Image (spheres, rainbow, N blue to C red):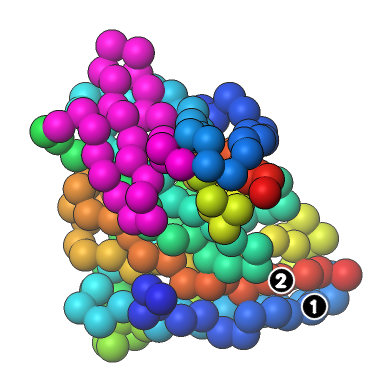
Amino acid sequence: AQSVAQPEDQVNVAEGNPLTVKCTYSVSGNPYLFWYVQYPNRGLQFLLKYITGDNLVKGSYGFEAEFNKSQTSFHLKKPSALVSDSALYFCAVRVANSGYSTLTFGKGTMLLVSP
Amino acid sequence: ETGVTQSPTHLIKTRGQQVTLRCSSQSGHNTVSWYQQALGQGPQFIFQYYREEENGRGNFPPRFSGLQFPNYSSELNVNALELDDSALYLCASSLPTVKNTEAFFGQGTRLTVV
């Protein structure tokens, strides 16, 4: 079965420091990977995706993610964290089925950025 | 904002009742998916509609049903509500079943079953 794992329930970082939110995946074939962010009482907002090409993907709000095929990882990164980055982050993989495809999500990682 | 709108934003129902949740998809998107997000969990796929037909379903019982209309808006219906149905229900619209396309989510409907 295709899946993603987010090993950390919560990540704490001080404002201005770099942040990393981890994600590993298990898929057959080529992975199509996504990061979404969820603010309190809101839906999911798309941040970035990896389809093919460069292993470093740049997305919204200064976020980027590094695809590592050998380690089956797709970690989310930002060079300098902001307090406003505090939110719930989800890694997802697009799964192909018979005639349709869906997103399979990890459990989410809460990012807390302290002033 | 994504252009995907859901209504209502919050809803309280009694166990055994029925509920209908609504979703308007982003312009140009003819594929709508519904997800259930229980507290502390990632979203779980319920089903997907493409051109007014259900073309995929997750591990949810038949009392979860849906519709898609000619304008690509969609409804999620849940019959015989159970306490465990309490969750955030998310609608996502996307281009047709293409792997490399992202889905755009609405703000969700928070359903509480008492």
Marks 1/2 in contact by CB < 8 Å: the verdict is yes
Q: Position of residue B14 (x, y in %)?
A: 84, 76
The verdict on residue B111 being magenta is no
The residue segment tinted magenta is A54-80
- In the picture shown, does residue A22 fall above or below B69? above
Q: Quarter of the image holding residue B11?
A: bottom right
Q: Position of residue B80 (x, y in %)?
A: 74, 69
Q: Is residue B104 left or right of residue A110?
A: left
Q: What subunit carries mark 2?
A: B
Residue extending furthest toward the right? B114
Quadrant assignment for the C terminus of chain B: bottom right
Q: Position of residue A1 (x, y in %)?
A: 41, 26
User: Who is closer to the viewer here, B49 or A94?
Assistant: A94
Question: Three-letter amino acid code at disc 1?
Answer: Lys
The residue that appears at 72% across and 52% down in the rendered structure is B39
Question: Could you say whether the residue bearing mark 1 is in a helix, strand or loop?
Answer: strand
Question: Three-letter amino acid code at disc 2?
Answer: Leu
The residue that appears at 43% across and 66% down in the rendered structure is B105
Judged by depth in the image, the label closer to the viewer, 1 or 2, is 2
Q: What subunit carries mark 1?
A: B
Question: Could you say whether the residue bearing mark 2 is in a helix, strand or loop?
Answer: strand
Label at residue B13:
1
> Marks 1/2: CA distance?
7 Å
User: Who is closer to the viewer here, A15 or A36?
Assistant: A15
Q: Position of residue A108 (x, y in %)?
A: 58, 41
**Total number of numbered discs in the rendering:** 2
The verdict on residue A63 being magenta is yes
Label 2 sits on residue: B111
User: Who is closer to the viewer here, A85 or B104?
Assistant: A85
- In the picture shown, does residue B95 fall above or below B37? below
Quadrant assignment for the N terminus of chain B: bottom left
Q: How packed is label 2: few (under 14 Cα within 10 Å), some, or many (20 or more)?
A: some
